Amino acid sequence: MKPVVMPGYFMFPILPGQQNSLSGGMGDLRANHFHAGLDIRTGGREGLDVHAAADGYVARIAVTAGGYGNVIFLKHPNGATTVYGHLKTLNDTLGTFLRQEQYRKQTFEIDLRPAPGQFPVQKGDVIALSGNTGGSGGPHLHFEIRDDRDNLINPLLYNFSELRDEVPPYFERIALRTLTPGSRLNGEYARQTFAPVRRADGSYGLNQTIIATGLLGLEILAYDKTNGSPYRNGINCVEVKLDGREMFTYSMNSFPHEETRFINVHMDYETERLFGQRYHRCYVADGNMLSLYHTDQPNIPTRRGRLPMMDGQAHEVAVTLFDVHQNSALLRFRVQPDTAATPLAGLKPGNQAEAVTTTTDQNILKLAVRNLPDTLAPPAMLMEGKKTTEQAVSYIHNNAAVYLIDMNQNLPEMVQFGAGRMATNLKKRIIPGREDRYEDANVSLQFGPKTLFDTLYLSVRQTPWNLEINQNTIPLNDFMTATWTTPGVSDTMRTKIYLVNGRGQEKYVGGIWQKNKITFRTRELGRFQLMADVIPPQARFVSVTPNGLSARIADDLSGIRSFRAMVDGEWVLMQYDYKRALLWSDKLNPTQPFTDGAEVMLEVTDNVGNVTSIQGIISTPKPRAKPVAKRKRRR
């Protein structure tokens, strides 16, 4: 998709005409989404004027505790929309309108759609002050440009003179991974990482030897920088060539807003979850519907940017990174052919029980078995219902027999190797694009046509208070619904489902009870645990004066669901910054103080319904006594 760009149409919204820099760029890889615009730096402070980038009118005003925080959408005559997020306050006209609507609906979070022309703006008008509201990690302005079909356009294409960029992108690491059971990388079926080295001429190379055969997938961990900023931004364009032939290109100039969740199959989701590193895949993974790529053989699903190393020859791979200003970085490396025969014997017999390491990689179940009793690895027996299939060893590595099981062909419930047996907990193949269901005595799982990116090889394991559904390293596109019959739970109001990650951190999911069954929806897989939140939220007043109210609120487990403040029985808008756990009042008439002696009530509710209510009395703070000056003694 090539966006239509009119240079000069939009003005820079922060300190126009002055040099500035960015803390985030279009297409930065974020959790579950691509960054949709620019994060414009504001010098580490709030309160800078935010200017309308062009003539138009206010199409939307919204307030959320997370996300964009306070945000304004402007519609322009050319059909485009500009978005201004994390605002501190709106200008007087818009701020008054917003506050009146919040009071009318008695809500802090709100989404307003003024009538076209109700609030016209001219290019350069100050529409708000910059801030740090919502999910912002520090003061800045989030700025987007969208076309008339809600496609996101990279604002850097408009060549704002306020931003200079003479700094090229750079490589941090790359990864290569085997993609078929017959593929090998340095003798293994594995994903391996390599550290590019910058040469004297500015290009990059690898000092490690790479020997491979079969189809390989290339992944890159790379970033861009701009003048005057220490922050790492995303890559605008990637080009991969094999022996001079273009195999794959990726361009982040424009993309449909509704496609953003496909980032989870654009990047290596498992690596992101396990290590926090967001690698770009330089091939189109199964289930990836993004419109950001050109590949050598787009109609062959098994290719689409994958690198073929199947002819027994050495090949040169060249990867070029570009930013919007055409600064570039080049990495070249060679892949040598794997001519050695795959070893199928030569184990050192063990005298202990067999030990198995199990991993799944796309559609491959990989079993590495140690302590086998013979030098020759026996075939593994794959048991699925009444069917048993023999699986030969694939290769020997580090004194382990490695079996590669294609789960499209076999989905074993049990695997036997030598004297040992191992349950896989594999239950069923769930195919994307259609509704499907899995049921056993205690668990029912419902999948919609958009739940999955790719085929899910469903694994289910239950313990009395835990339900494990695959691993949290497998992404979901849309929600699935689970119903779980559990042991007797007496407190169903406060006992709910939490998703527990590998570090033991709990994330509230919720659920609805019907007798001894709890039903919940989730957009993530992993370990779900029943937990009871019996502790009400914490709340304490910081200030209760005629000038305003403020309070600290927090919850130890399920999280804050709502809050409500009343002064002499009248509802009062409380602004909320969850990052500081702080509430503060925003009066309907900012010039009118609260009445001295008025009764104040603050009620805070967590996600399972625990309620904390605190009371106070409006009172004017007493002036502090001036310290008495001490006389100096004469000597």
Image (spheres, helix red, strand yellow):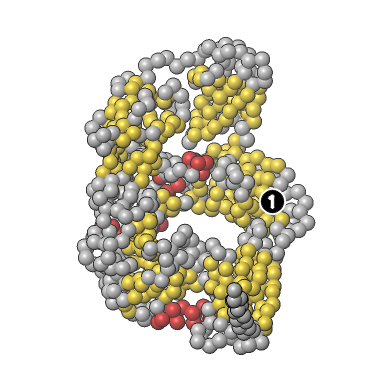
Q: Residue at x 25, y 29 (%)?
A: 243
Taking the view exactly as shown, the residue that stands out farthest to the front is 635
Q: Residue at x 39, y 47 (%)?
A: 289
Identify whether 470 is placed above or below 537: above
The answer to whether residue 42 is above or below residue 501 is below
Image vertical order of residue 154 relative to residue 51, above or below: above
Q: Residue 194 vs residue 428: left or right?
A: left
Q: Is residue 100 left or right of residue 74?
A: right
Judge from the rendering whether residue 181 lies leftward or rightward of residue 494; answer left or right: left
> Toward which corner of the image does residue 184 lie, by quadrant?
top left
Along the viewing direction, whichever of 228 and 193 lies nearer the viewer: 228
Q: SS of the residue at dot 1?
A: strand
Is residue 134 or residue 132 the one in the foreground? Answer: 132
Number of on-image labels: 1
Amino acid type shown at disc 1: Leu
The residue lying at 33 percent from left, 67 percent from top is: 14
Where residue 319 sits: x, y (%)? 30, 37
Report whether residue 133 is seen.
Answer: yes
On screen, residue 351 above or below 278: above
Residue matched to label 1: 530
* Quarter of the figure with residue 495: bottom right
Q: Position of residue 501 (x, y in %)?
A: 59, 46
Residue 233 in percent (x, y) is at 36, 51
User: Foreground residue, 338 or 613?
Assistant: 613
Q: Is residue 59 visible?
A: no
Q: Quadrant of the C terminus?
A: bottom right
Q: Nearer the viewer, residue 559 or 172?
A: 172
Q: Write the residue at 31% across / 57% down.
A: 154
Q: Residues within 10 Å of mark 1 (few under 14, many from 20)?
A: some
Residue 427: x and y in percent read 60, 37
